[in-house]
Amino acid sequence: AHLLTDAHIDHIDLDIWSHFPNVSLVLHDAWLLGSHSPADTLLKAEELSIACNALQLIGGNYELTALDLSNASLSIASNSNGWNTQVWDASDGDSEGEQFAIEQLVLMDVQIKVDAQEVAVDEATLQLDWTETGLMSNGSGRCASLSTMEFTTTNPLTWSAELDWNTDEDTINVSVSSLNWAGLEAEFRATRNALWSVEGTVESSTLAALRE
């Protein structure tokens, strides 16, 4: 298994206490290029902390106990060749039995952009599991702002959700079990095939939410 694009790390610290008994590597001023072009930066972070069981990692089990990302930007983009996330190749060597998962992903002050959609994440805790067809995730968090082609707000929102992203079929299913924003409480399900479709229920609302 190896990276398919370039990456950079300014320096690395070893942390044996934050996620004891697992060992953490703290990467400072790191970036990772996306798969579209040399000018495509997928991830840039002031600090990225990776906690794992070293013995399992050597055995081909890429299950991270925790990954903490702070003061960072993540830019996911698509073009005619697909998404710019094709940065990892696990096919060479003896890949049988390999798996890649993150038990706990913590985001602090992270800007996330997916094509024309942008969200500023104050804090979030997620669980991620990469499968043969894509990514499955669940978690909760708080966002400071949200910007899409259809809707923009600077009112903070809190959420709890699940994600199923099939990169082979280029489909995304998002199930939001709890959403609180500007006094509005709702739950909904969003699906992306060629276009996004959304359906859900508003449990309560306020005049401030209706005005936006």
Image (tube, rainbow, N blue to C red):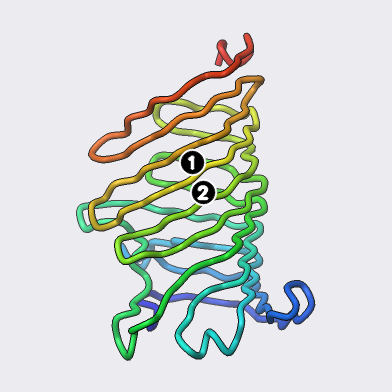
Left or right of 170? Residue 98 is right
Q: Is residue 31 above or below residue 13?
A: above
The residue under the point 69% across, 80% down is 22
Q: Are marks 1 and 2 in contact (CB under 8 Å)?
A: yes
- Secondary structure of the residue carrying tag 2 is strand
Residue 154 position in % (x across, y down): 61, 29
Assess disc 1: are there few (<14), some (14-19) or many (≥20) residues with their C-alpha within 10 Å of its C-alpha: some
Q: Quadrant of residue 178?
A: top right
Q: Quadrant of residue 104?
A: bottom right
Q: Quadrant of the N terminus?
A: bottom left
Question: Circle 1 is placed at which residue position?
Answer: 118
Label located before the other in sequence (1 or 2): 2
Q: Is residue 37 something one can see in this rendering? A: no
> Which kind of residue does numbered mark 1 sit on?
Glu
> Which kind of residue does numbered mark 2 sit on?
Ile
Q: Is residue 71 above or below residue 52?
A: above
Question: Circle 2 is placed at which residue position?
Answer: 112
Nearer to me, 105 or 26: 105
The residue under the point 41% across, 46% down is 114
Nearer to me, 47 or 172: 172
Residue 208 position in % (x across, y down): 63, 13
Measure the alpha-carbon separation of dots 1 and 2. Answer: 6 Å
- Secondary structure of the residue carrying tag 1 is strand
Nearer to me, 150 or 199: 199
Residue 86 position in % (x across, y down): 33, 66
Q: Is residue 31 something one can see in this rendering? A: yes
Nearer to me, 110 or 188: 188
Furthest-right residue in this view: 17
Left or right of 72? Residue 200 is left
Q: Quadrant of the C terminus?
A: top right
Residue 39 position in % (x across, y down): 38, 63
Q: Quadrant of residue 20?
A: bottom right
